[in-house]
Image: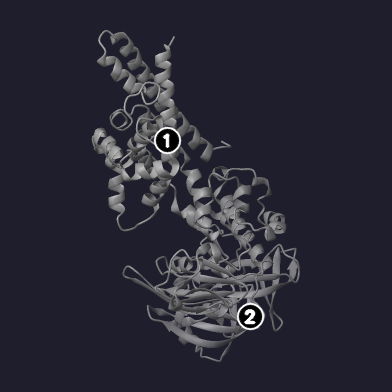
């Protein structure tokens, strides 16, 4: 049904999307928790920084990544010297770019769900002898699971469809960084490939719809399990 | 009048101290400034109008808030000392808290809630505490499936199973309907008999306090108005407004002397060969029983009135006479009856017409029907 090139684009998109979500999840939860439960100086600045990729042109994000994490960038040189990792022009680089672009969505969703957790329950847990970390792992995080799942899937869908930052930072290399949107872009650029482009376009819509539906279903299911397991 | 089984004042006054606090905290325009030492045993009730600072005080003791200044100690253990920047976080205080709303964790079953803070050393106490609170059948339920009273019981069990050195209870009966309230009160009363740790019990209901407290702390606008044994505070005429005003009452700790099955009455021993007759109480002879006598249910007579429907004619001596500022009609009396103190409220006119004075022997008349356990 699907051509090998289409499969390649989909699987690559999945691989990049999943890696992107996996690497942004820990810092995403940590920052969401900071923003939801703490007052500190520079909170507004951190909040702004987190949201920057949402409002910046993706090309700017890609360019900034190139400047910092490219072979000549300070972070890129350090990564290369210490671990032998080169990010530009690799699928890992695409995952970094997609992750940065999806980060604000993830943090927003997790922050909202953390804020919805009743601090009175956390206070109760502390009087029962639980320290901060135990409270977070046993009370706050489990009760925030619905939002966490929605946020993760939303971020995943966003990472799947990343284009601007990816092409700037990781380029458009078939089989390495050419995800679904890049494949679609390539087809549109080539004369006579309109039908193939339309097929990919349809695929993109289907995948996006599926992840939205899945996120809704998961969130509802998780809420249900949390509150009315016996009902 | 209410009777409560099994309560009695501690026989000796202890001078060692359980909880000791001397703290101040500014909360907006409200100032909390408290210097207080509580007994090591029994139930100390924090009593005061809403907004008087009871719950703020509880939060300081539990470690959920920091005082601006001061110290908090349990025995020799220091929880807070602002002078040396010492602040023990709540999870290291070993202070159990039962919150007004049960605050059960919705994603744990009852069993999981109960064991959440349970150290290995308290494992052997799990079954006894579950039995005591009657929650054995609920262990596998989710909190969402519990009634209000059940949830409160679970939250009491959860706090007790942390093996605390002090138990704080913040109006645990609030929001329950009459029968549920009575039921939970019975559980709490049986608990206070079995526990060896001091309990701080917060309430704004004088009846609840009368039933449960050994020691009473009156909190008024962020300061301590009085802190003494329950009967001593309740019998202070100058505190009438704070301890119930119109509904002020005395509390008598008695023992069941005998039962009159034919008329369904119970005789309570007041000491000095005096007995108080009340409607039948289901309790064994010799059992402790606390009764609450509202001041306005006590009438006085100069001599034995041969025929009257008052069931109780007690020999009393007027020990103290006082008036209330906001009530020019009435006069407040403190009587000695047997080994107990009893308060009475008369109109000033009756007082003058009878020619009553301090030190005079009188008959205290208490209607038998005034004793009603079911309220």
Name the residue that disc number 1 marks: A21
Instruction: Tell me how the rendering is colored.
Output: one colour
Q: Residue at x 56, y 54 (%)?
A: B152
Q: Secondary structure at mark 1?
A: helix
- Mark number displayed over residue B342: none
| Vertical comparison of B375 with B77: above or below | above
Viewer-side residue, B157 vs A61: A61
Label 2 Cα neighbours within 10 Å, binned few <14 / some 14-19 / many ≥20? many
Q: Nearer the viewer, residue B56 or B255?
A: B56
Residue at (60, 54) in percent of width and height: B153
Toward which corner of the image does residue A157 lie, by quadrant? top left
- Residue A231: which quarter of the image? top right
Report helix, strand or loop for mark 2: strand
Residue indicated by mark 2: B314
Left-right relation of A164 to B308: left
Q: Nearer the viewer, residue B354 or B197?
A: B197
Task: Determine contact: label 1, label 2, CB under 8 Å.
Answer: no
Q: Residue at x 57, y 55 (%)?
A: B155
Image coords of residue B375 (percent x, y): 56, 60
Q: Are marks 1 and 2 on the same chain?
A: no
- The extreme front residue here reads A81
Mark 1 chain: A
Q: Residues within 10 Å of mark 1 (few under 14, many from 20)?
A: many
> What quarter of the picture does the N terminus of chain B occupy?
bottom right
The Cα–Cα distance between marks 1 and 2, rounded to whole angstroms, is: 82 Å
């Amino acid at each position: 049904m699907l051509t090998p090139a289409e499969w390649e684009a989909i699987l690559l998109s999945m691989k990049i999307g999943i890696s992107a979500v996996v690497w942004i999840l820990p810092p995403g939860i940590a920052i969401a928790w900071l923003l939801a439960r703490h007052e500190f100086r520079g909170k507004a600045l951190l909040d702004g920084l987190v949201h920057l990729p949402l409002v910046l042109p993706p090309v700017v994000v890609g360019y900034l990544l190139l400047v910092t994490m490219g072979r000549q960038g300070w972070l890129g040189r350090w990564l290369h010297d210490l671990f032998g990792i080169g990010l530009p022009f690799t699928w890992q680089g695409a995952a970094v770019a997609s992750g940065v672009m999806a980060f604000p969505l993830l943090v927003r969703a997790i922050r909202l769900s953390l804020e919805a957790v009743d601090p009175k329950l956390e206070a109760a847990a502390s009087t029962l002898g639980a320290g901060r970390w135990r409270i977070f792992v046993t009370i706050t995080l489990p009760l925030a699971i619905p939002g966490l799942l929605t946020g993760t899937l939303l971020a995943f869908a966003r990472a799947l469809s990343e284009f601007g930052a990816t092409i700037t930072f990781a380029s458009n290399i078939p089989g390495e960084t050419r995800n679904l949107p890049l494949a679609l872009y390539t087809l549109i650029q080539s004369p006579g490939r309109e039908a193939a482009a339309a097929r990919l376009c349809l695929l993109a819509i289907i995948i996006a719809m599926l992840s939205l539906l899945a996120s809704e279903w998961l969130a509802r299911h998780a809420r249900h399990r949390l509150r009315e397991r016996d009902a | 009048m209410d009777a409560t089984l099994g309560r009695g004042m501690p026989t000796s006054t202890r001078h060692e101290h359980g909880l000791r606090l001397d703290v101040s905290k500014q909360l907006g325009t409200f100032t909390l400034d408290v210097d207080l030492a509580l007994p090591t045993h029994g139930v100390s009730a924090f009593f005061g109008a809403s907004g008087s600072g009871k719950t703020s005080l509880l939060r300081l003791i539990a470690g959920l808030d920091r005082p601006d200044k001061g110290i908090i100690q349990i025995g020799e253990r220091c929880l807070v000392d602002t002078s040396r920047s010492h602040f023990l976080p709540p999870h290291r205080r070993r202070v159990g808290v039962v919150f007004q709303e049960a605050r059960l964790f919705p994603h744990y079953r009852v069993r999981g809630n109960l064991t959440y803070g349970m150290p290995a050393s308290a494992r052997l106490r799990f079954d006894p505490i579950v039995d005591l609170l009657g929650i054995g059948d609920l262990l596998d339920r989710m909190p969402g499936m519990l009634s209000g009273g059940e949830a409160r019981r679970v939250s009491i069990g959860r706090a007790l199973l942390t093996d605390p050195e002090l138990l704080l209870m913040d109006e645990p009966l609030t929001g329950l309907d009459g029968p549920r309230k009575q039921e939970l009160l019975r559980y709490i009363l049986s608990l206070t008999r079995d526990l060896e740790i001091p309990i701080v019990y917060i309430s704004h209901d004088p009846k609840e306090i009368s039933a449960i407290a050994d020691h009473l702390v009156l909190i008024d606008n962020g300061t301590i108005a009085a802190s003494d044994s329950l009967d001593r505070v309740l019998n202070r005429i100058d505190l009438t407004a704070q301890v119930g005003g119109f509904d002020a009452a005395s509390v008598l700790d008695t023992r069941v002397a005998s039962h009159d099955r034919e008329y369904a009455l119970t005789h309570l021993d007041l000491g000095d060969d005096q007995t108080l007759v009340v409607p039948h109480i289901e309790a064994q002879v010799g059992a402790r029983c606390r009764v609450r006598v509202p001041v306005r249910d006590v009438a006085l007579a100069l001599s034995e009135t041969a025929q009257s429907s008052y069931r109780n004619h007690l020999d009393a001596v007027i020990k103290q006479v006082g008036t209330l500022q906001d009530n020019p009609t009435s006069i407040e009396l403190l009587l000695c009856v047997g080994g107990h103190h009893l308060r009475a409220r008369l109109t000033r006119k009756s007082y003058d017409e009878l020619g009553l004075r301090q030190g005079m022997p009188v008959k205290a008349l208490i209607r038998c029907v005034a004793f009603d356990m079911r309220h």
